[in-house]
Image (cartoon, rainbow, N blue to C red):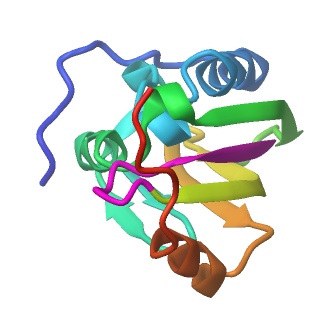
Amino acid sequence: GAPADPAPKSIGLAPADLAAALARDLSEGRYILTGNLTSSLFADDCRFVDPNNAVDGLSRYRQALGFLFEPTRSQLDNVHVRVVAAGSGRATIEATYVASGELKLPWRPKISPWSGKISYNVSPVTGLVVAQTDVWNITRFDAIRQTFTPGSTSRR
């Protein structure tokens, strides 16, 4: 399995508090571009899925994100997070955003703004995120095509 994160987990957070913390991580940490997230909100074996990848494990997800986008040249805007289902069963939290950025590849491809919607499945036992599924308004093919389109090679 994936190595455990040493930070203690935020067990038993109310869905609204979890949603607020995720909103902070998206707005301030831009974690889907940087990997800079509050690990105590996620189960160590959380499954992260987007149109291009599926990653099992929090540490592997954070590591993968660290290699992807150039943080100083990437944006995450129009973040909205809300609890869409809560109660006796599993809570679900939904987030929407608009992102764009530059990939950390030698030819510095720029990824045009895209809209995304993240669904977070929350464990009814721990209150931690156990699955994150990100859906985009661009096709998987379009995302990959942009990866092979050179951006600006000049550095600031």
Residue 133 locus on image (x, y percent): 60, 60
Q: Residue furthest front?
A: 154
Q: Which residues are magenta?
A: 96-108
Residue 106 locus on image (x, y percent): 28, 56
Count of numbered tags: 0
Query: In the rendered structure, does residue 16 fall within the stretch colored magenta?
Result: no
Task: Report whether 79 appears left or right of 51.
Answer: right
Q: Is residue 126 visible?
A: no
Query: In the rendered structure, does residue 100 fall within the stretch colored magenta?
Result: yes
Q: Is residue 147 visible?
A: yes
Residue shown at the point (74%, 17%) measured from the top left? 20
Residue shown at the point (41%, 53%) measured from the top left? 108
Q: In this orientation, which residue lies closer to the viewer: 115 or 110? A: 110
The quarter of the image holding the C terminus is top left
Query: Toward which corner of the image does residue 47 lie, by quadrant?
Result: bottom left
Residue shown at the point (42%, 25%) measured from the top left? 36
The quarter of the image holding the N terminus is bottom left
Residue 58 locus on image (x, y percent): 32, 42
Task: Report whether 82 appears left or right of 132.
Answer: right
Task: Report whether 65 appears left or right of 75.
Answer: left
Q: In this orientation, which residue lies closer to the viewer: 113 or 133? A: 113
Query: Toward which corner of the image does residue 97 lie, by quadrant?
Result: top right
Q: In this orientation, which residue lies closer to the viewer: 87 or 109? A: 109
Q: Is residue 39 above or below residue 131?
A: above
Residue 72 locus on image (x, y percent): 49, 25
